[in-house]
Image: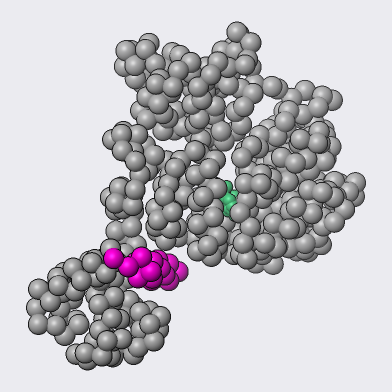
Amino acid sequence: MNSIGTTILQMLKNEINEVDYQRYIKQLKFNIQESRSDLAVFNVPNPLIANWIRTKYADKISHLFEIKTGIKSTVTISVGITKTKPSSSNITIPQQHVGERPPLALLNPSYTFNNFVVGGSNNFAYVASKNVSEKPGIVYNPLFIYGGVGLGKTHLMQAVGNVMQAAGKIVIYTSVEQFLNDFVRHLHNNTMERFKDKYRKCDLLLIDDIQFLSGKNQIQEEFFHTFEALRNENKQIIITSDKHPKKIAGLEERLKSRFEWGLVADIQPPELETKIEIIHKKCEISRVKLDRDVINYVATIIENNTREIEGILSKLNAYSQLMGVDINIEFARNVLKEQIAEKRLNITIDTIVDIVSKELNVKASEIRSKSRNSGIVYARRVAIYLSRNLTPNSMPQLAHYFGMKDHTAVSHTMKKIHEMMKNDEDFKVKVDELSNKISVMTME
Ligand code: ADP
Ligand code: MG
């Protein structure tokens, strides 16, 4: 049997032109040792080819993985000769046999505690997970982590998995769907004993997105027994969900109550500072170089779903490689223009005036007045500048709103602010901060 990587390359061959295949794709070697279910690593002998494939075919390869395995894989093209034996292109995926040690759980190797940025929003879940990784089966069992999409639940759960797997423990990472499919398959093949064996003999069971158990009665029953068996043996269980166990509709009471036996930890949306740190981390991991102001900018345009970051970074990176230019703030703004266009629709001049008035301690009505008081003029200019940048309003519309003569007055204000920002670093920082604040507040 071919390895999944080889199968994917074969699929790709059928879809692309012969020249690309012969010249570039043929040089890809699937690196099965470093690959995981959601990370496909290929090696290629030289950086030029690597770059070329990354730009032109990485997305396509990732898509083929998704079609074939149902899991969205990140595709990494590394330079270097694969360490696998020469017959690597014929490696088979490890199969599980009765009584044998199960294959390693497919965990994302970059989901580690080290790579997790801790802030007020996730500190509790982080500390709980860390404790569990140090004393599995003892401190809190189960550990139940819940929170919105993209807030790091899977990351934390797999961080525990990575620690335990490195210590030689048997880890199973699964979704409700996989658990269910596995169950049905074994039921069908009359091999339920193997199913039980598999799930009851691990040291750590990670079940992601348990909310999908909702309404599936038979699998709830099976999961209940698995849960009981593991817990009786002090084997650690970690569960994630998008909501508190009490709030999962269509879930048996006995499961709900058991989910609360250990520790229930929530993750809240990250604060701006945490988002900034996470972007730093992601840049470090994917070796993308971004200036401080680009990072701040990206932090303000992502919503609470941290998952957006990776997409944005690879978009910036791909564009910059393609165009052969560095990523600076203008470049980032340009590339991400569409991404934020929709979000900007939420920002109105009223909101901007409101926030500026609070931040700069002047009344909103004063900002819209004709007062020449210097503090008020200052606040008014800032509000006009931000309204021009953050809303789709035209200069005449702004002139009308701020009670100015006509659009030339607005354009004059814009010039003035640009000048001030150029000459006064503190002022620039202040305006950028305000801009970030408005973007963030209007997104929530
Ligand atoms: P969830 O399972 O809660 O939907 P994930 O764990 O899949 O979210 O996280 C989405 C992405 O955001 C992942 O790439 C993850 O590494 C990253 N991420 C989320 N929170 C953090 C954090 N605090 N520090 C570093 N990366 C994070
Ligand atoms: Mg998840």
Up-down relation of residue 211 to residue 354 (above or below): above
Which residue is nearer to you in this view: 51 or 176?
51
- Residue 428: image location, x then y, percent: 34, 66
What residue sits 79% from the left and 43% below the top?
A: 204
- Residue 153: image location, x then y, percent: 63, 53
Up-down relation of residue 97 to residue 227 (above or below): above
Left or right of 171, for residue 240: left
What residue sits 29% from the left and 65% below the top?
A: 423
In the rendered image, residue 375 lying in the magenta stretch gets the answer: no
Left or right of 114, for residue 205: right
- Residue 219: image location, x then y, percent: 71, 47
What residue sits 32% from the left and 12% below the top?
A: 19
Q: Outermost residue, top direction?
A: 86
- The residue range painted magenta reads 423-444
Q: Main secondary structure of the magenta part?
A: helix
Image quarter (top left, top right, bottom left or bottom right) of the C terminus: bottom left
